Image (spheres, rainbow, N blue to C red):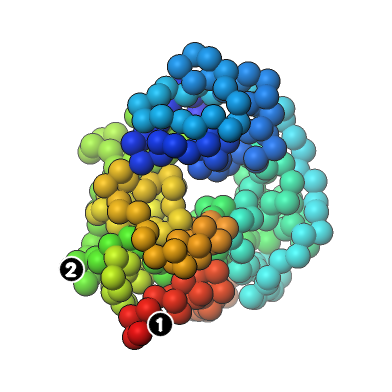
Amino acid sequence: MADEDRAELSVRPEEAGTRLDRWLAARFPELSRTRLQALVETGKVTVAGRPRKAAYRVRAGERIGVEIAPPEPQRLVPEPVPLSIVYEDADLLVVDKPAGMVVHPGAGHASGTLAAALLAHAPPVAEVGGQGRPGIVHRLDKGTSGLLVVAKSPRAYEALVRQLAARRVSRRYLALVHGEVKPSRGVIEAPIGRHPRDRTRMAIRPEGEGKAALTSYTVLERFAGVSYLEAKLGTGRTHQIRVHLASLGHPVLGDATYRGRSTPRIRDPILSGLVDGLAGVALHAAALSFFHPVTGQPLDFASPLPDRISRLLSHLRNRRSA
């Protein structure tokens, strides 16, 4: 959410017929289902000015108001949450984050975060970086899996932030997207900022109203109605790859937030079921390269495609060869 504690959103045509609770979960992925349910039950969610039940089916064009009180300041508490650590030394660690894990605390996500797990694993990170974001140099969306680097010392944090600003950190993603992407290679350069009417989303903005954003992509395979591609970040804006690919008409599979009204529905029931079971979006941070913030040594890390996405890819390949 922005500074306001109230949002008023419009139901998009492709969302018509969705249960209100599921619509809310898609539009407010940063809020837990428990918190959203409480908002509905206490009348904090209105449709055309009237409170509705969670099972209400939304209609295209309806205005839905959501009142969210600013969360009370919370002290970040260490939690012994298991971490998949790819590399660690005295100054940094590289983590392979699963889809579904939130990086730092926010509305509806006070526990089970990567930040809390880091505090339990390496308590000194409490003194590194910003408040509530111990040692976290860059982030991944909740629904995105893959690699990110964490600084364990102030000197490492400052050096890594400088590398990011200078675009010396290489981040390579793998994604499955709607549609058959053409051409096979491309560069998307378009500013990104908050959506002017829906503050829970990002959007391509006119020059001067958003931050510069650069994404390059290469198509690895094409299937009927789906493309498998590699994307590389030139910048690191919120939801950047998801927004940029959606702007081409090729939103990431499983991304209800940026799936446009013109995106065809998946007709293959097996594929549709696999997408529903993603526990996020079909986007994975597969490779990460940078220079060690203290020694200057080049470091390269890779993460295999997780089962949640590889199952989709296997089905698409099998379907093509059948």
- Which amino acid is tagged 2? Pro
Closer-to-camera residue (81/250): 250
Residue 276 sits above or below residue 320 on the image = above
Closer-to-camera residue (224/107): 224
Q: Secondary structure at mark 2?
A: loop
Of callouts 1 and 2, the N-terminal one = 2
Q: What number is the disc on residue 183?
A: 2
Closer-to-camera residue (26/144): 26
- Name which residue lies at 39% across and 53% down: 242
- Name which residue lies at 64% across and 26% down: 39
* Quarter holding residue 79: bottom right
- Which amino acid is tagged 1? Asn
Closer-to-camera residue (319/42): 319
In the drawing, does residue 224 fall left or right of residue 67? Answer: left
Badge 2, how many Cα within 10 Å: few under 14, some, many 20+? few
- Name which residue lies at 25% across and 66% down: 180
Residue closest to the far bottom: 321
Identify residue for label 1. 318
Tell me residue 213's x, y (percent). 32, 51
Tell me residue 137's x, y (percent). 56, 56
